[in-house]
Image (cartoon, grey):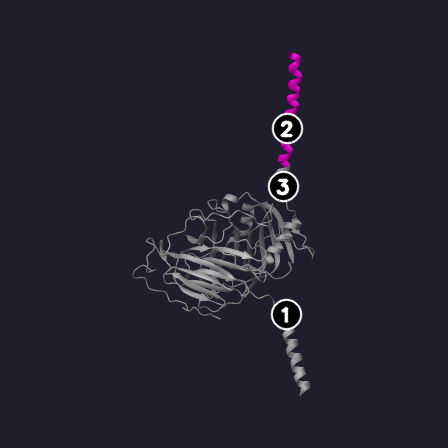
Amino acid sequence: MRRTTAYTLVSILAVGLLWMGSSAPVAALENAWGYNYDANQASYAAIETANPAIRDGGFSYMRTGVQRIINGNVYYVEIGWYVSASNPNPRYHWTYRATNGVVDSGEGGAPGCCNGYNYQVLDVGAGDWQIFYNDLSTPVVTVGTGFDTADDYFSGGETSSANNAMGISGNWNVSYRRNGTWYCACDWQPWITNSVYYVARLNNTSWQVGGNN
Amino acid sequence: MQRVKRPFILAVGVLLTAVIALIGVFTIHGQGTQAAPLDQGTAVRLAIQAAQRPMPEGWLTTAPLEARAKAMSFGTAYQIKNGRPLDASTKLGQDANRSTWLVVLRGDFTVPNEPAPGKPTVPPLTYHQGVVVLDASTGELLSVALYPPTHEIADSALPQATIPTGGTTLSEPALSKPTDGPLPTRVRNGGATIPANGLPAGTPRPSNGPATATPAR
């Protein structure tokens, strides 16, 4: 009986070690947003910069963007601020996944804590979107995504794992644009993938995102 | 009088020639410095470090199998990376002449499928080609792009680079930029320019995802 138990324990340990050794790094991103499924061609938020703690070599990111979902695949375009273990000074970070699968990104600037800065993505036709940081009159870049209308808008945080802090950031006056008209995100809903994070209402179109700080 | 003038003119001439020669030397030296002060090895090492750090769009999970690198303007790097020219009317377009290193890496890149509320979670994808663009003077990371096997860029014309083995990890370039002054944000609290109901009258309401503040998993 004792021998059987020992064999079982050793087997469990061996299988566990094998599993740990063979597992590739998993992209276990955590998100906390305000969002809604409203068809749109732009999203906007004034997002406050913060200095979240990075505890495991990963990142913390706070952004607004839109998603286009085709056959379960999520294509997106977004911009916000980003800090990582190797570069704790916040920078703007934009990224998109085009419908051909290419993902592209860029970073720069120096948004200061704890001010609110303009962040916006705006469709300009032919699958192209303009991405704005701070200055809403001149885009940072024009990118080719392959889609012109998105299925949802969102604004909120993402971390590389639940070890890292998110925010704390006000996502103010979140809005989306449809057929040339801007609408407030007054129908927003919270979405949280891990209970260490939160999305709290500030007013009917603004929310605060944070957690694990 | 003429005896006094000739040596003076000669001296001025020699001095001017020397000054022009010195300016020339410094200009040529300066251009060289601005073009690629980071050597290829340092650029590749910084690019690998940048590619291996977790980022929202994906990152390199293995040691690179191949590296190619070339110093070029940001405009040229963007054209190679994106297959289209930089939009001159954008802020990056105004930076088209910036000196950069373009580094193409091959290896395994994990590309997370961004989750969407109420939709099934799709496992991350694996890509095998990535491009990193760095400022040639400071090593500052400017851009990263990752390509699925069906849409890899042609990179055979770029010079192959030696992949550093072990050695010291370079510290990421310190970015001590002055903070950007925040410009006025749009009117808060759903102001007059934004309809309060969120939808134009008569628009059918799209179906929503789950409305919950509790964890989805």
Q: Amino acid at mark 2?
A: Val
Q: Residue A5 in the image: x percent, y percent?
A: 65, 84
Q: Mark 1 vs mark 3: same chain?
A: no
Q: Residue A210 in the image: x percent, y percent?
A: 48, 62
Q: Chain of mark 3?
A: B
The residue lying at 49 percent from left, 59 percent from top is: A167
Residue at the disc numbered 1:
A22
Answer above or below: position of B170 versus A5: above
- Please say if the residues under marks 1 and 3 sit with CB atoms less than 8 Å apart: no
Residue at the disc numbered 2:
B19
Residue at the disc numbered 3:
B33
Number of labels in the image equals 3
Q: Residue B33 in the image: x percent, y percent?
A: 63, 41
Give the spatial CA distance, label 1 vs label 2. 66 Å
Q: Mark 3 vs mark 2: same chain?
A: yes
Q: Quadrant of residue A54?
A: bottom right
- Left or right of residue A152: residue A161: right
Q: Amino acid at mark 1?
A: Ser
Q: Residues within 10 Å of mark 1 (few under 14, many from 20)?
A: few
Q: Is residue A93 magenta?
A: no
Q: Do we see residue A179 in this rendering?
A: no
Q: Residues within 10 Å of mark 3 (few under 14, many from 20)?
A: some
Q: Chain of mark 1?
A: A
Segment tinted magenta in the rendering:
B1-28
| Precedes in sequence: disc 3 or disc 2 | 2
| Residue sitting nearer the eye, A65 or B85 | A65
Identify the main secondary structure in magenta.
Answer: helix
